[in-house]
Image: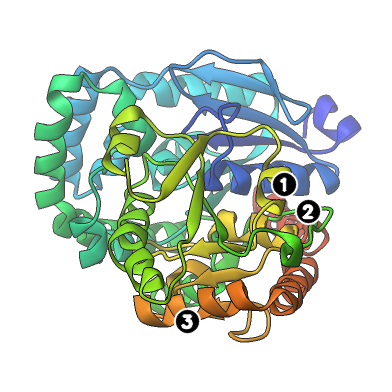
Amino acid sequence: MTAQSSAAGPVVLLLAARNVTAARTGRIAVLETAVRGLRRTGARVVTVAITAEPGPGEWLGCPVVRLRPPSLIRMGVAACASIVLRRTLNEALFDSARLRTRITEVAREHGAMTVVADGIRTWEAARSTGLPVIAHLDDLLSERYASTEFADGNNSLFGYFRSHIPSGLVRPLEAVVKRLLWLEARRARRRELAIAREAVVTALTGEAEARRLEASSGSRVMALPMAVEPREPGDPGNADPASAAFLGVLHYGPNIAALRFVRDELLPALRQRGIDLKVTVIGQGGPEQREEFLRSGLSFTGYVDDLSEALRGHRMFISPILSGTGVKTKVLDSLSVGLPVVATPLGIAGIPVEDGRSALVADSAEELADHVAALHADPELARTIGAAGRNVLIEHLSPATVDEGWHDALSEAMKAGQR
């Protein structure tokens, strides 16, 4: 232990495969929870953000070291190596000897005693430091990529990374990657099992996914979701009964697929009931995504500075997610202000709400339309469901609850380091 570590608590290196100071996404919310939870245990956190984007050198009161990802040429070489080594193509995005060496140097410079790895993409770099690794995989990529809905409804496979690829190469590369999703799913499965068996601590955001990986790997897997502070509740009963909010960045394929479902199935089913639902889409998105939904009954606000205020002005929140894995931060944000949630089972996966009491859940457009119609007609129902959902957040997914998990994870990593 260094003098710095012993005086101010252990130093934890958070290795992030993204620009953590950019607009908040679900994954950034998970990393925020990790930083705050670790700091409340007495640890000092240093974040290494693998990004080409500029930004502040501090995040959540902790230093941020920015390291550029490999060039496209190096990524191509790494992709070929991943195929030979039976790793995932995801890992090729951040895999280079230079980057691994630099990350190890940063760990030594700051006297880090353990590393938190942001998903599969950073596992090898975290492992190369020689320090105990807490591998937070977020969700099971193997299950996400194996989903037919994910492949068929996804026109944005590269997500936020799409902006780093020359525009002329995006569509050809996405077409190739879409054809390789089945192989990526199989390799992700092998990598998830290997990581669970080797990492000092392995974690996922969802409890059910954690238990599945634990059973298949034979190793302990923790559930460490994002935590959302309960905020000042609104009064959905007083809002426009035909107003609904949807939250999500539009570079993520499952969000686009959900909006297509809203446009093509949910809104027509509601019009048959005489309801013209106005859906406000909150979240960043480019003109290409917005153009697809022109004249569809959806309005786009883009990124908002005060998310709570933007959500409080609606009668309900809709989360008709058809593919994907993990806990949806968007739903937690809506629960935090007492907004009643109408969702598919995947939309509330990992969140212990109960259909009919703290959320309204259904599989089909017709059943979802029935739930929307019920909230539209009954302001008291909106208040009751919204308040019950907010209580679920307070009891199960508030910082006080999730911090305990991060305390346990850090304790295990520190014990491993001492051994």
Q: Residue at x 72, y 54 (%)?
A: 228
Mark 1 in CB contact with mark 2 (< 8 angstroms): no
How packed mark 3 is, by other alpha carbons closer than 10 Å (few <14, some 14-19, many 20 or more), is some
Residue 143 lies in what quarter of the image? bottom left
Q: Is residue 232 above or below residue 171?
A: below
Q: Which mark is residue 324?
A: none
Which quarter of the rendered picture does the N terminus lie within? top right
Q: Is residue 233 above or below residue 104?
A: below
Q: Nearer the viewer, residue 353 or 52?
A: 353
Q: How many marks?
A: 3
Q: Is residue 292 visible?
A: yes
Q: State the SS at label 1.
A: helix
Q: In the image, what residue type sits under mark 3?
A: Asp
Q: Which mark is residue 308?
A: 1
Q: Residue at x 67, y 32 (%)?
A: 305
Residue 84 location (% of width, % of height): 13, 43
The disc, 3 or 2, on the residue closer to the chain's N-terminal end is 2
Circle 3 is placed at which residue position? 370
Is 121 left, or right, of 279 in this rendering? left
Is 344 left, or right, of 419 in this rendering? left
Q: State the SS at label 2.
A: loop
Q: In the image, what residue type sits under mark 1?
A: Ser
Q: CA distance from mark 3 to mark 2?
A: 30 Å
Q: Residue at x 83, y 26 (%)?
A: 4
Circle 2 is placed at which residue position? 229
Label 3 vs label 2, nearer the camera: 3
The disc, 1 or 2, on the residue closer to the chain's N-terminal end is 2
